[in-house]
Amino acid sequence: MQFMKHLPSSCPACSEPLRIVRLKCAACETAVEGDFAFPALMQLPPAEQEFVLRFVLCSGSLKEMAREMGLSYPTVRNKLDDIIDHLKTLAHEPTR
């Protein structure tokens, strides 16, 4: 099994949201600095990000996801509903 490193979106010391302050091109070294928020999908925990990725790769078919994951359709639907609620919460949080 291959493990992917996940970009942290919260501070390991105080758990507050991290901000992006610098982006750099690996090819030409151009850098952009500012104060940027993480996109909502990147603010989800890794397991929820993985679920969203699987959902897209299954063309949005919860029936197909349930089959692949070995779960019931209602269980998969509930997981999606939880992620939707989480994204709605993130969308209403004030940016810092």
Image (cartoon, rainbow, N blue to C red):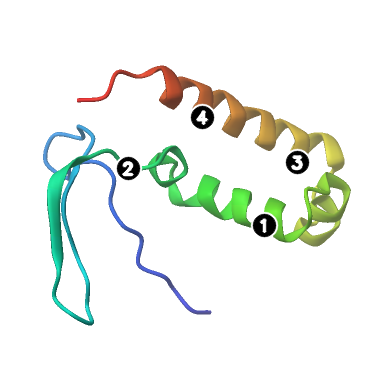
Q: Nearer the viewer, residue 66 or 92?
A: 92
**Residue ID for mark 3:** 76
> Which amino acid type corresponds to the residue marked 3 in the rendered image?
Val
List x then y, in percent, for residue 30: 14, 69
Q: Secondary structure under badge 4?
A: helix
Q: Earlier in the sequence, mark 3 or mark 4?
A: 3
Amino acid type for the residue under numbered disc 2: Phe
49 to the left or right of 67: left
Q: Which residue is mark 1?
A: 54
Label 4 sits on residue = 87
* Of the two numbered discs 2 and 4 in the rendering, the one whose residue sits closer to the viewer: 2
Q: CA distance from mark 3 to mark 2?
A: 26 Å
Residue 60 spot, x, y in % from top left: 78, 48
Q: Position of residue 6 (x, y in %)?
A: 36, 60
- Residue 66 coordinates in the image, percent (x, y): 82, 50
Question: What's the residue at 86%, 57% (across, down)?
Answer: 67
Q: Residue at x 72, y 31 (%)?
A: 78
Marks 3 and 1, the one that precedes in the sequence: 1
State the count of labels.
Answer: 4
| Cα distance in 3D space between marks 4 and 1 | 17 Å
